[in-house]
Amino acid sequence: MNRKHSSASADHGFTLVEILVALAVLVILGAVLYPSLLSEIHFSDRATTRARLEVLRRAVTEDYLRHAMAIDTLQPGTGVMALDSAAQYVLKTGPSAPPGNPYAFQSGLIPIAQDADTPAAQLAVDGFGRPWTIFVSDPLTTVRNGVSLTYHTVAFVSNDGGPENSAGQVLNPATQWDAATGTLTIGGHDVGVVVNGAVIERHLLHQTLTTMRMIAGEYATYFETQYQSNANRDITIDYFASAPPGSTNASAWDSASPIGNSANGNGSGFAFPGGVVAGLTPTALTGPSVCDMQPITDLNFTQTLGLSTADGSSAWGYALGVGNGPNSGSSAGTCYGDDRDPQSSNSALQLPPYTALIGAWAPGGTLVTVPVVGAY
């Protein structure tokens, strides 16, 4: 018996019911996965925000360390901080750039971006592409080792993906900035970073004092060596220097000294800030001067003591000073004298032990000195 078999061998597409079922499954999966996807995107943007905050912290600190003399000498106004001696690059309280236009960033971000090796337009926004809110303190003061130091505090804040309006990010109401103290209080989900100039200025002062004390020690040794090598070993002679120009009391000074006297008329003088450093315009930083002090690059001082240029510079990048002449270290116009030497205008300071001064200018025109005592 012959039997015939029939089969549906022809291809056919999806039915409408199958398509609807597939779409329903996709909608359900999308509804389940979409919040997770948004969360992952938000997490990535938040991570970028925190990474850029760290970059800003390091770069601002680097720039501050290099230009602290200008930053804390020039005081262009409340909420504004100049990063260079010409006040060309500034940071100010407000958005780091106009919302929606990161290429119109604040000029102060240019040197900071160079230190960060990052495009300034990228550094001007957080991980969500929104300009930071920048806060700059008033000029503040801290005292360390008896020295009054001026400093600023600067902060960068993001609302971490929160709302934004035409003026920039809308920070949480609990986020507060006190310009008079440089204190940032973070509220809600806002995030930020603060660079405290007090820490930087204290560090620079510590480095400068370390260098000055080293030089003072070398200079004290020089005094003793000059005394010991003198056959007469006369304790009435000031072995720190040769006599001042035109001195009427030359016998009271060391005629064999290769180090010149810092008396006025024997050098360029030691007006603030004390010397020239590459990248700064010294004429833009003006301030006080002192009597009878000279940069230590003068008077054959560094050559005699075997000091390098780096040895003779403060951590702020300017030449240190030496005062070994009459009335050294007093304010210009007073010239009463802070050191002990045979020709001091203060008769009480004309007798041994003779002293000299190593000086440095701190931001704002504060003179820092380390005394050197001549031992016989």
Image: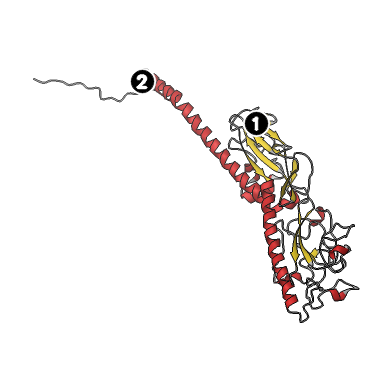
Which corner quadrant holds the N terminus? top left
326 sits left or right of 39 in the view: right
Q: In front: 126, or 139?
A: 139
Q: In this image, 19 relative to 97: left or right?
A: left
Disc 2: which residue: 18
Residue 303 in view in this figure: no
Q: Secondary structure at mark 1?
A: loop
Q: Which residue is mark 1?
A: 175
Residue 307 position, x and y percent, is: 70, 69
Amino acid of disc 1: Thr
Which residue is found at the position 22% from the left and 22% from the top?
A: 7
Q: Is residue 26 visible?
A: yes
Give the SS element for disc 2: helix
Amino acid type assigned to the residue bearing label 2 in the image: Glu
Of all residues shown, which one is farthest toward the bottom?
Answer: 231
Mark in the foreground, 1 or 2: 1
The residue nearer to you, when weighing 223 against 104, is 223
Q: Position of residue 92 (x, y in %)?
A: 73, 40
- Using the numbered discs, state the Cα–Cα distance from disc 1 to disc 2 in whole angstroms: 54 Å
Q: Quadrant of residue 293?
A: bottom right
How many residues crowd mark 1 within 10 Å: few (<14), some (14–19), many (20+)?
some
Task: Tell me which residue sits at (61%, 47%) in the image.
Answer: 58
Q: Which residue is the extreme one toward the left?
A: 1
Q: What numbered label is drawn on residue 148?
A: none
